Image (cartoon, coloured by chain):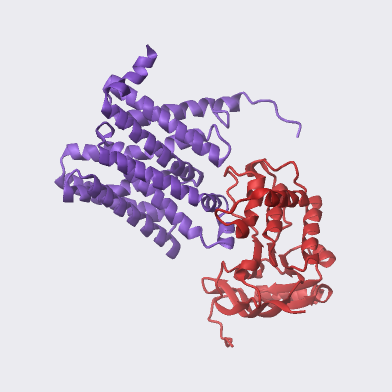
Chain colours: A red, B purple
Amino acid sequence: MSTALAFRNLTLGYDRHPAVHHLETEIAEGSLTAVVGPNGAGKSTLLKGVTGVLSPLDGEVDFGAMSRDDIAYLPQQSDIDRAFPLSVVDLVAMGLWREIGSFGWLGSARRSRINAAIAAVGLTGFEDRPIGTLSGGQLQRTLFARLLLQDARLVLLDEPFTAVDTRTMADLIEVVHRWHGEGRTIIVVLHDHDIVREHFPETIMLARELVAHGPTENVLTVENQFRARQMCEACDGPPHVCGRDAA
Amino acid sequence: MIWDLVVQPFADFGFMRRALLGCIAIAIGATPVGVFLMLRRMSLTGDAMAHAILPGAAIGYLVAGLSLGAMTTGGLIAGMAVALLSGLVTRVTALREDASLAAFYLISLALGVLIVSTRGSNVDLMHVLFGTVLALDDAALILLCTITSLSVLILAVMFRPLVLECADPQFLRSVSGLSAVTHFIFLALVVLNLVGGFHALGTLMAVGIMILPAAAARFFAVNVGGLIFVAALLAIVSGFCGLLMSYYFSLPSGPAIILVAGIAYGLALVFGPVGGLVSKVLPRPHFES
């Protein structure tokens, strides 16, 4: 299998403090990978590094044959202004941005794709509801519909199932599996190890540094989890300049 | 009878017709900008920008007297400078947009007041602050209509990115590089419309016709298109009624127009079907699902 994404000695952080430290690993094309680790392990930071929101302090993200334009990203906390007068269908339609840009006509073909995406996340009948009236789970379904339309080769989801009920989660995982079946590369930050074991073939465990990356059953071991906790606690202390060689 | 009262002033006097045309132009150009200011929670930014324009207009006045071109150019330069500098400071340093904008507009305002008070007379200051809607000449009308046309055109071109920049800026940044451009062009539109507005209504009153109808429209419309339509309509009606009030009761026209817009806002606040006071007190029965 070819490589979709390679992290080469990647260090990401805030104000010189690394949140992801000298990460060196590769994500295979078409893989379905969970990213796990304690709070503060750098999981969300890693996704921000991939999208380019955060520039590396050191090292790089190698996209190979892909580019940043192939990414669809669902942040942990979206800064959507829910008081803004937009309807569900408006928000979902924005997923077509790369096709239609500022002026492109929607047309009936695209409209039916929008409706299909809304149906795929189980929101048929909610098309004209203002986004301000949606529940947390309904908004998350709406955002998944938008991701569906983005039709991206690389899908990044940051804790997409927090604060949604089991039924919604099952529906959204269904969407993730569908993407996986279509050969897209998917990286999902998750906390619930049961969900990871059940649905994700690959896992990356982070504790600022890479703890383990491989088939989920090899990564989610008691020893690795213990090591991850220790590594996260170990790096709390007075700051000093990292002495590791950049190469 | 009422028809005569309402139409006669405009039929009899050219200056009333010119004033009405000016008001309609400002209403159509400024209210969509005001709607977006309100939706982006930047309603007070309009006010800050209006103050920022003052020194430019004052310097234009110093150089060339009460000249349309000089004061317009000066106002545009001062407004754009404040918009760009504050935007730059926000993106480059740790300071947030509200603080950096406040800093620059206060400096600009102090400079403007200094210039006006040392060199101009009180009458000139009143012109800049309250405008001269009843004395719009051809050049001023052409300027107002040009600004309105330009503003509506630019807004149409950037409508989709602007909506997205307001509703979900993170997403816009992830799919397009237009985020920063959209923000600056929008601020430029605010400045442009305020500069157009100050010839007719004065720097301070121009903000009123931008924001008050937009705020009132919030109680009637549930989507962006509806908001813009209702706001523009309210602004035009305010201009019309304000001019009539100013004609019959010899009131200064700028404040009269804004006060009518204020009355419209008050009525919307109470009777507006979308979240107005009456609809809160007397809720309609809820749906099954």
Residue nearest the observer in this picture, B205 or A214 = B205
Q: Quadrant of the C terminus of chain B?
A: top right
Percent position (x, y) of residue B203? 31, 41
Percent across and percent down for residue A48 are 61, 67
Residue under the point 52% across and 74% down? A16
B20 vs A181, left or right, is left
Q: Is residue A43 above or below residue B145?
A: below
In-image side of B179 versus B258 (left or right): right
Residue located 58% across and 43% down the image: A83
Q: Residue furthest top?
A: B1
State left or right for residue A107 relative to residue B87.
right
Image spot of residue B266 (x, y percent): 46, 27
Above or below for B285 versus B174: above
Quarter occupied by the N terminus of chain B: top left
Question: Can residue A129 be seen in this snapshot?
Answer: yes
Hey, which quadrant is residue B274 in on the image? top right
Residue at 66%, 46% in the rendered image: A89
Image x and y of residue A226, in percent = 76, 74
